[in-house]
């Protein structure tokens, strides 16, 4: 029974937190500086998730040129810059990762 109390409480808290921003933005308009800074929040959050996965797949820094995650990530960055397509970036980046992991596994690396 106590797990349900925790789950409902967290759900209500999450709802109220999100609702507060909707209600707040109707009455308060952020300055231009705040608006410009907020445009970088999604990129910064995404980088905080992705970079450790590319550089530290096993919990330790891995800058080995044969790190399949790092190689596929670099290729994905190149594809993103060239195509500006999220779909192509994800599809080709994952394909590159799977192929590199398979090839390096065959080579015993």
Image (cartoon, rainbow, N blue to C red):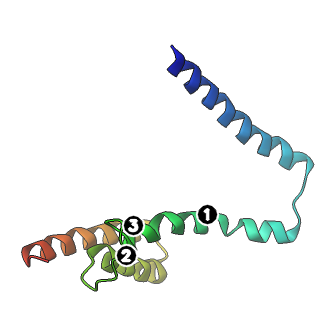
Residue 53's label in the rendered image is 3
Vertical relation: 16 (above or below) 79:
above
Alpha-carbon span between mark 2 and mark 3: 10 Å
Q: Which residue is mark 2?
A: 61
* Position in image of residue 72 (x %, y %): 32, 76
Relative to 65, say whether 101 is above or below.
Answer: above
Q: Position of residue 88 (x, y in %)?
A: 38, 70
Distance between mark 2 and mark 1 Cα atoms: 24 Å
Asked whether the beta carbons under mark 3 and mark 1 sit within 8 Å of each other, the answer is: no
The answer to which of marks 2 and 3 sits earlier in the sequence is: 3
The residue under label 1 is 42
Query: Mark 1 or mark 2, which is nearer the start of the sequence?
Result: 1
Residue, x 73% and y 65% (percent of image)? Answer: 38
Assess disc 3: are there few (<14), some (14-19) or many (≥20) residues with their C-alpha within 10 Å of its C-alpha: some
Q: Helix or strand or loop: what does disc 1 sit on?
A: helix
Quarter of the image where one finds residue 15: top right
């Amino acid at each position: 029974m106590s797990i349900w109390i925790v789950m409902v409480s967290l759900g209500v808290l999450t709802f109220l937190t999100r609702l507060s921003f909707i209600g707040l933005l109707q009455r308060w308009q952020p300055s231009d500086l705040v608006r410009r800074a907020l445009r970088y929040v999604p990129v910064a959050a995404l980088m905080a998730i992705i970079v450790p996965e590319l550089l530290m797949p096993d919990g330790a820094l891995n800058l080995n040129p044969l790190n399949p995650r790092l190689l596929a990530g670099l290729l994905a960055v190149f594809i993103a810059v060239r195509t500006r397509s999220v779909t192509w970036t994800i599809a080709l980046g994952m394909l590159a990762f799977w192929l590199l992991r398979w090839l390096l596994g065959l080579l015993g690396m």
